[in-house]
Image: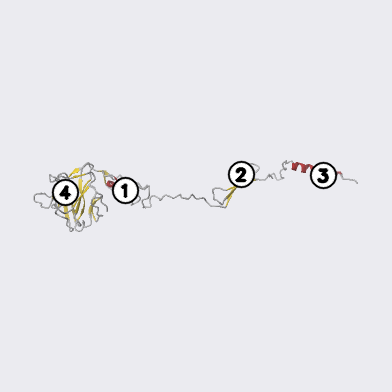
Amino acid sequence: MTHDPRSFVALFTWTLALGASACGEPEPPASDGSSTTSAESETTTGSSGPDATTTASTSADGSTTTSTTGGSTDTTEGDETAAPCGNGVLDPGEECDGDDYGDVASCNDLDPTLAGWLTCTAACTFDTSACQTEPDMGVVLDELISSGGDGIEIYNFGRSPFDLSGYFLTDELTDPDDSYDPMADLEELEFPEGTVLAPGERMVVFQGGPPDSHLFGLSTAGDAVTLLDPDLEVVDFVAYGDGEAEVSYCRLPSGPTGTWTAGCTPTLGDPNLP
């Protein structure tokens, strides 16, 4: 039998190629120049959610391509968002918010040595720029109620004790410039020896009788009250009109800088409130 020499050449070439493949030698590059090496892939669960998969593929030239499918954005449980400053409600960490000052309304509430009104900043902190330092000594009439006992409040707004011994409380004067004769006044209250108000203390005097109550009473139709020192110098004077003191007539805020205002919240013995 005669064999074609070309058949032996083809068989030898095929055998060599088969042997090279079995030994793990790399395949020749494709004719278009692209790599035929299989890409390595890694699947991980990423931060995009428990159902998300992130696939990383590394090509023969060393570059890596990643893709994420499925899942949802993770959220951290228990992470509460702080209430915003400026919502008009006093929240934890704020001194004030808008018109909400909590239990503090005036400079005096914040510091007994101060007088004036507080304001609230855009950062929800107290603005004390309008506060003024109280004098070392001083007392004022601070609140009147012409019903339910006819209470008169005297307030020591100073930083030192104030001795009221020998002072007079009366409704005889209609003007602070009027002269006063305690001997002619049968209803005045003269404070007895040892009547001392501590700094920031408020004393309420009701209608009754000496040594710690006044006899004159307060008219709901309008009246005037004067506090005089032992030398008959007027310390403080206040007059009110018909019905103004029936609920409460008070200084806002408390102290010498406060404006007398009708219809306050009754707070005899405590800081005044609108």
Q: Residues within 10 Å of mark 3 (few under 14, many from 20)?
A: few
Q: Residues within 10 Å of mark 1 (few under 14, many from 20)?
A: many
Marker disc for residue 64: 2
Q: Earlier in the sequence, mark 1 or mark 3?
A: 3
Dot 3 amino acid type: Leu
Dot 2 amino acid type: Thr
Q: Residue at horizontal 31%, vertical 48%?
A: 119
Q: Which residue is mark 4?
A: 227
SS assignment at label 1: strand
Dot 1 amino acid type: Thr
Q: Which residue is mark 1?
A: 119
Q: Residue at horizontal 81%, vertical 42%?
A: 12
Q: Earlier in the sequence, mark 3 or mark 4?
A: 3
- Taking the image as shown, residue 16 lies to the left or right of residue 101, namely right
Residue 82 x, y percent position in the rendering: 42, 49
**How far is mark 3 from mark 2, CA to CA?**
42 Å
Dot 4 amino acid type: Leu
Residue 53 x, y percent position in the rendering: 58, 50
Q: Which residue is mark 3?
A: 11
